Amino acid sequence: MSSDANAVLEATPEPREHSRSGLAAWIAVHRHVLVVWAAMTGWSALMFALVRADYLGYRLGRFDLGNMTQAVWSTAHGRPLESTTGLGEQLSRLAGHVDPILVLLTPLWAIVPSPLTLAAAQIAAVSLGALPVLWLGRRHLGSDAAATLVALAYLAYPWLAWTALDAIHPVTLAIPLLLYAIWALDSDRIWAFAVFAVLTAASGELLGLTIGALGVWYALARGRRRAGLLIAALGTAWTFVALLVVVPAFADGSSGFYGFYERVGGSPGGLLETVVRDPGAILSELFAGHVLVFCIALAAPLAGVFLFAPGLVAVALPQLALNALADPVGPIDPRQHYLAAILPVLFAATVLGISRLRPHRRMPVAVMIVVVSCALSALFGPWGPSASPLWYQVEASTEHVAALDRAVDLVPEGAPVSASNRVGSHLAARRYLYMLPAIERAEWIVLDSTDLWLPDERLPALRERTPAELEALRNGIEGDPAWTRVFAEDGVYVFRRTSA
């Protein structure tokens, strides 16, 4: 063998060694990003396992997984965002909530037509919010390790898990979108911000107020007054157009959700009038004890560090005020989706708050936030011993779940149906999905006598009824000659229409 051949053979392993060292170097450079991606993947897998168990156990009902499923299904079948209201009307979702971002989920439904697809999309989207937290941290903290810890604290935040599992609400998608918007604005990427701001606004009619407040922050904190004031004007205008133009156009009147604010005016105009005429009524709602508890619950996992960035924290005040002024308890329950416009601001402000500490204190504070978030998540997260289920998450026995499965299997695909709340999410992929006691043109009825939550005629929401009311409803259907009972097992009843 020639000396040249020997030289070639001896040199052959070197590229492999170079490749290995190159990969090791790449991993070393990007290890913090890889840690966050691994945490996002594991978190998403855990959340999906939990939400799948909730769905199969009938702990996710027509409100709201079934509502979103029907809207996406209708969009895929040429009727954009159409759904059946709790009172039996066929309306676009835009008649109540202006959240057209749901349309973007239609391709996913076309690939895997299941309510769990929508739940998985929400979980994956929420997990992606860890990346802009990491990027903000790397820009402001001067430490990749500290930035990584804050990003991990985002995933460990106890109320984020609750929100991700509360499948599905378009406004929840605003959590990552707002974080990306803040990151883009913080780095003067105006066009990137515009994209994320538009998507955020498409997640809910009130998100424009948060975008508007973000514009004010940008004008004052970054000195970009012209751009900031334009953002403020456009964001605020979106909310007013959505409430005063879009909703009335599709609802043929005002939104039923204005009923949440009956105590303080009952409409945007009424609210402004109350602010002027009776500011004391507004202040008493804003500083009520349950609102203070809500604020403490949001602040505790972050140890209140965001208060070192008061200008950015102020961006969350419009949504916080609206939550405090609402009548039901849901908006001030940290486990529900009403914190979607607040949580991203708190995390971005936490990063800026840490950056205002002396460099040698930033890492200890980041460690503290992760430890506190993990501890509170262990106690109050969906898996914690101190956690209590949401109002609709009633634990059903194995026998009852099996009865519900058999009842659902009896209803033909696409047939108009009226059903109880908990079973409604499994029957939502159809045009007509009524909710008892509304029957309208239903051909089938599935009644779960253990599910006491029925629509409230005053609000587009549910309220708990008594077992006697459910029994009276069942007796009324059984006594109607137009209906024949075809299934009865473990308190679950199925009726089929036999005459017009």
Image: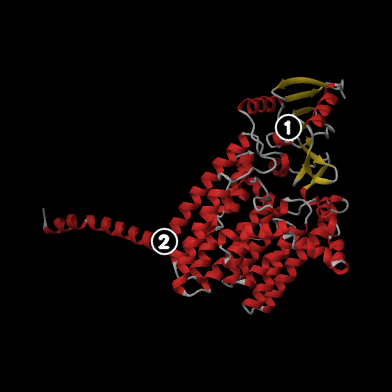
Query: In terms of image quadrants, where is residue 306?
Result: bottom right
Horizontal arrangement in the rendering, residue 169 relative to residue 259 (left or right): left
Q: Quadrant of residue 144?
A: bottom left
Q: Position of residue 265 (x, y in %)?
A: 86, 59
Q: Nearer the viewer, residue 260 or 42?
A: 260
Name the side, left or right, on which 156 lies relative to 66: left
- Residue at x 83% of width, y 54% of height: 258
Local packing at callout 2 (Cα closer than 10 Å; few below 14, some 14-19, many 20+) is: few
Ranked by sequence position, the earlier of labels 1 and 2 is: 2
Q: Which residue is mark 2?
A: 30
Which numbered disc covers residue 397?
none
Position of 428 relative to 407 (above/below): below
Along the line of sight, the residue nearer the viewer: 150 or 302: 302
Q: Which mark is residue 414?
A: 1
Please tell me whether mark 1 or mark 2 is closer to you in this view.
2
Q: Residue furthest front?
A: 289
Q: Position of residue 157 (x, y in %)?
A: 56, 55
* SS of the residue under disc 1: loop
- Specify the amino acid type for callout 1: Gly
- In percent of the image, x 74 and y 43: which residue is there? 78
Residue 125 visible: no
The image position of residue 332, as x and y in percent, is 70, 54
Q: Nearer the viewer, residue 293 or 237?
A: 293
Q: Position of residue 54 (x, y in %)?
A: 61, 38
- The local crowd at label 1, few if under 14, some if 14 to 19, many if 20 or more residues have their Cα within 10 Å, is few
Query: Above or below — where is 310 with respect to 112?
Result: below
> Which residue: 72% across, 39% down?
62
Q: Nearer the viewer, residue 182 or 277?
A: 277
Q: Amino acid at mark 2?
A: His
* Up-down relation of residue 213 to residue 155 (above or below): below
Residue 59 in view, yes or no: yes
Find numbered disc 2 in the image and state the secondary structure of the residue it sits on. helix
